[in-house]
Image (cartoon, rainbow, N blue to C red):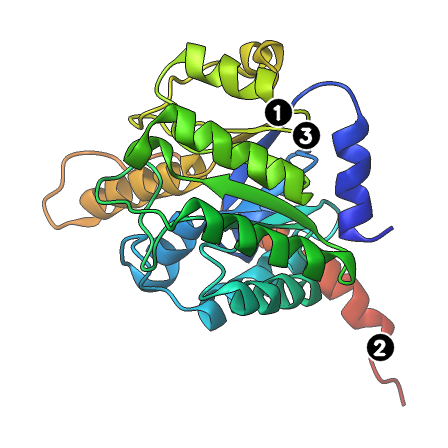
Amino acid sequence: MTPAQHLRELLKQPGIEVMPGCHDALSAKLSADAGFRIAFMSGFAVSAVRLGLPDTGLISFAEMLDSLRNCCSAAAKIPLIGDGDTGYGNALNVQRTVIEYTRAGAAAVMIEDQVSPKKCGHTRGKQVISRAEARMKIRAAVEAARGADILVLARTDARAVHGFDEALVRCRDFEAEGADIIFLEAPESEDEMRRFCSAIRKPCMANMVPGGKTPILPPAQLQEIGYKLALYPVMLLSAAVAAMQATLAALRPGATTAAPPSVSFTDLQRVVGFPDYWERELRYQARD
């Protein structure tokens, strides 16, 4: 079963799927090992981890594609959705993004309607392309996906720029163009979330960002509203940053605070696969 086929089967099943946001091979592997059935490669998180820079269009297509290959390989047993940002150009660039994300192993690619350089969905300064151009980019993505075996997750950021009604109209455009999953970014109330889900027949995705513009609701409530996917894009990154900062503070000369809990070196070896490596290494050991 291909990653796209796996994701299609998940979308047919009842219930909501919780998606942790990963940013590298290790976070993708941990997500799969923890029993999650789907993961998402977050552009915010990849930009932070790979460049130490904000998600403001600074990271390149090649860098994102390289990170995607690593994430898909590490999370091989579960489908992974890749953040394709604006598609890195016009409609033809979008089609190349769709094809290359398929080759990298993604089950779906997210394409948004922001002006390039894009901004994180819950930060200031966003702008969106015209409704007509946005529709053509999703049309191009869907047509490329037909021959590439990948799903298209269509996203609009128009809520922050033109209001909820315009964002909903764009979502309906994307659905009409054949997008497989619809994502209205940053609705600002539970009522808007309900209006969005009730207007769309395709699977809908919620984006849970603590401190962002959208109310943080438990998965059961998101399911009742009508969402199929619940994304938590930066929780792993936020937790890792907090742990690293606390550990660094504890390592300073004269520090009086203890380092936060950590896995043992033996457990760390297990997490990254040393025991399996050693077992397989013995199989190919030369014997005279």
Residue 200's label in the rendered image is: 1
Q: Element under label 1?
A: loop
Q: In the rendered image, is residue 33 in sight?
A: no
Q: Nearer the viewer, mark 2 or mark 1?
A: 1
What residue would you read off at disc 3? 202
Residue contact between numbered discs 3 and 1, judged by CB atoms under 8 Å: yes
Closer to the chain start, of discs 2 and 1, is: 1
Quarter of the rendering containing residue 211: top left
**Residue depicted at 31% across the width and 33% down the height:** 162
**Residue depicted at 80% across the width and 28% down the height:** 12
- Nearer to us in this view, 99 or 283: 99
Q: Which amino acid, mark 2? A: Tyr
Residue 284's label in the rendered image is: 2
Q: Element under label 3?
A: loop
Q: Position of residue 161 (x, y in %)?
A: 29, 36
Instruction: Indicate left or right for 273 with 288 as reference.
Output: left
Residue reaching furthest to the left? 254
**Residue depicted at 66% across the width and 34% down the height:** 36
Q: Which amino acid, mark 3? A: Lys
Mark 1 neighbour class, 10 Å CA radius: few under 14, some 14 to 19, many 20 or more: some
Alpha carbon distance from label 3 to label 1: 6 Å
